[in-house]
Amino acid sequence: MQTKTAFFLILIGLCLFTQATALGQDNESNNNAKKDTSTTRVVPAITNDKNPDLKQQSYAKGSLIATRGSSDVATDSLQVAESTPDQDSTRKKQERLTDKVTYKAKDYERISQRLKKIFLYNEAEVVYEDMKINAGEIVLDYQTNTVLAKGIKDSAGNYSQIPVFVQGANEVQPDSIKFNFDTQRALIYGSRVEGAGGQQINLKAERSKRVNDSVVFMSNVKITTAEDLDDPEYYFYARRVKFVPGKKLVAGLTNMYIADVPTPIGIPFAFFPMEKERSVSGFLIPSFNESNERGYSLQNGGYYFALSDYFDLALTGDYYTNGSYAFRADTEYKVRYKFSGRFSFNSERILFSERGLPDFSETNTYNIRWNHSQDTKSSPNSRFSASVNLGSSNFYRQSLNQSNTGNFLNNNFSSSISYSRTFPGVTPINFTVAATHSQNSQTETINMSLPSAQLSIDRIYPFAGKSGSKKGLIDNVNLSYSVNADNRYRTTDSEFFTAAMFEDGQSGIRHNIPIATNFKLFNYISASASANFEESWVFKTIDKNYDERTQTEVIDTINGFDAFRTYRGGLSLGTTVYGTFNFKEGSKIQTIRHVIRPSLSWSYTPAFDQFYTSYERLDPTQIDNTNPETIDVEYSRFDNGFFGAPGNRISNSISLSLANTLEAKVKDRDSTATEPKKIKLINNLNIRTSYNFAADGLKLSPIGINGSIPIIQDKLDINFSAALDLYALNSSNRRIEKLNIQNGGSLFRWTAGQASFGYSFSSRDFEKGGDEPGENTDRTENETFAAGGRPDDLFGKGVDITGNENIGTRDPKEEEEKEVQFYRFKIPWNLRFGYQVGYSNTARQDEITSHSLVVSGDIKLGNRWTVGGSTGYDFANPGITYTSLNFARDLQSWNMRFSWVPPVNANTSRTSWNFFIGISGNLLSDIKYDKRRTPDQRL
């Protein structure tokens, strides 16, 4: 009996001991999970109960093995117990997980072996292969190999730490997500995708199902470019969406909502390209407009070709119901570290009035623009560049679809295409070939150089020492060589690139060998001597004779090679004189310094009479021809040639120039400054004149004066120039060999003058904080400047060929960071002035030839409101000059602009207005409303 009792007691003790041991292990695992919450746990590949090899395994029998590597880092390995002898060890184990699953949390990590789950709380993170999930709370089920992530509520009851699901380059921010490691599928609620496919587009879906790495199905999706997904300014609501990250987004029935209000704008399906690497080809949606002259129109419609990663092409056009049309081709190209550029071609056919009416007319205009630049590192010894702007002279005045103020106000277009190469060596050789073009839109004259070539050799010092140092007169003797070849054509719009243009072309080649040296005189005077030899080759000369029968001069053009040679020499002396006046100590003005740079030069050019001849003709001044007298008319066969004729008069002249600079040192207002402040009182006051000893009559040339006076340091400089003549005028207003003071006048006659200044200031100049936050003061090269206009927007901001204003680049995030204020006691503004006056009195006309004032500016009424404009007044021809007003409103995801050219004077041909509102992002830029009234075309 006692034996049985003892046996039962031992059996009960063993049972209690076994149960206590299991409970102790379970408690130990929970305690270890609550100790160091900043550690990282590693879960190896786990299989679930579907694996037949693991059906008889028990996790309660020591399957949780904890290893401590150090006191700071603890790693728990959840491992499956090894196979026991009664199991079939020949059966292969199949693991669905292919990598380790690491996890961590800030507050706690709890492992439940009964539920076969791991609970992570506060700043939890799970990483598996290229997938990472961050959330406030994560539940990891290692039986089904799934993970559930969701946010948590903070102390204020707000939902925070929403899940962030990242896989590769794709990122999703849902309200909650459930992910299966085996199938790689996910079920997402309230998902957010920002910058989908690298584009400026954001998505928010009520429910999403991730099928695999490349396909996600969504329902009830908001598609927008607004940054605030919770309260977007607008969005497109789609019921069903198939999203392929990095490639495309296909939607079913889609409606547009503005401020959560549905609009009647809807489409049965939508396709959004989301290529990351480059743009995608597609149609460019035209805008609808109408005008009184050409009727209704579709503008800027066409097709965009994303040809490669290096260049693209956009073909667009306009069509008007009166038959006018326009065609444009634009391409941009860029090869990194090599070159980049842009090419644009525009062709327009404009019809005025209606066919059959007496005032009907039609005109064809075109314009070509090309800008190419080469990276200096791509080829150090060679360079190719292009800046082209040529076309019809009346293109900018009559264009159907552009209103670039700076372009039509500018009367001169110019182009240049050049290639240069340097051949390195002991004496480097430089070679350049170029084509240039200049055009006046008022006179419609075109001057072209097609092509021109130049070859030059760097200076050679034949008498310099072997050490390379050059001292004295002989050592500094140097010479060089250059040759210039050029083909010039002068034509008009109507004969441009026709046979008539090339028939009147001229060609010439000039060789030049300059020899020079420099030395010091008396240690204070710099002296230089020079001589120059030139040989000019031409291929057309003339021959003149007199036809007694018709009593006219006959000029014959002779085609063939001919040449002439000229030479000249000179000597110049110069020095610098400093004068300083010091004020007494403690004065506001401490020192005034006057710097004088006098220069005296002598030049001599002989007469080249050998290139001149003469012919006899009747004296045209004789009225009575009964006994006519003849006179000799001297001419050169090189007259009106490519280089002109060499001079047949000796030139032996001395030139004098005097450059002055007046500076002052004043006490700095900054008490911490250790040095006085330098300011300029007069900047470059230059006086120059010359005296020709060999002249027959008037030996002294007019005295020229020019300079600059700083009024406000680094802000306002008045530039001026004047011409003073010592000689008097006769009754025919011609200069005579008599001083003006001897003729009863003053010492000088003021014959010409000019003064101008430009000044810009803003609200920042009256603040100590410097630039206003968010102000864009960068005056980068814009479309106006590229076409020959002003880079400072003095005549207003330009509008490109599509009618969009060049408002520069803007960082939306930076703008969003500004606090929106309904009342601003600081209103940023900018104001720019340009003043110019010209005077002429060469022949007693005593008139103001030009006198104008131009004003432009802008003011920011708020963080998103900008009002600007430009105007001016012509005092010489009284009237208001071209005036424009611009209004812009940044609607966050949208832009709204209105520009107006009012009829401020009698010339109302440029009166127009334009209203535009559209989405800011490039992907949805075709969603816009553009309404304009084009300027009236006047014949």
Image (spheres, rainbow, N blue to C red):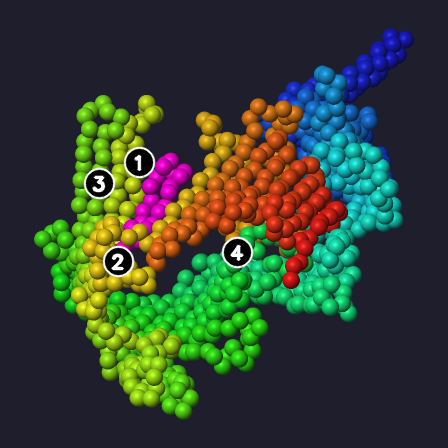
Report the amino acid beneath label 4.
Answer: Asn
Report the amino acid beneath label 2.
Answer: Ala
Q: Earlier in the sequence, mark 4 or mark 3?
A: 4
Residue 594's tag is 3
Q: Quadrant of residue 96?
A: top right
Report helix, strand or loop for mark 2. strand
Q: Earlier in the sequence, mark 4 or mark 1?
A: 4
Report helix, strand or loop for mark 4. loop
Alpha carbons under labels 3 and 1: distance apart: 12 Å
Alpha carbons under labels 4 and 3: distance apart: 40 Å
In the image, what residue occupies the spot 58% across and 41% down?
Answer: 869
Residue 679's tag is 1
| Numbered range of the magenta stretch | 704-728
Q: Earlier in the sequence, mark 2 or mark 1?
A: 1
Q: What residue is pinned by disc 4?
A: 410
Q: Earlier in the sequence, mark 3 or mark 1?
A: 3
Q: What residue is pinned by disc 2?
A: 728
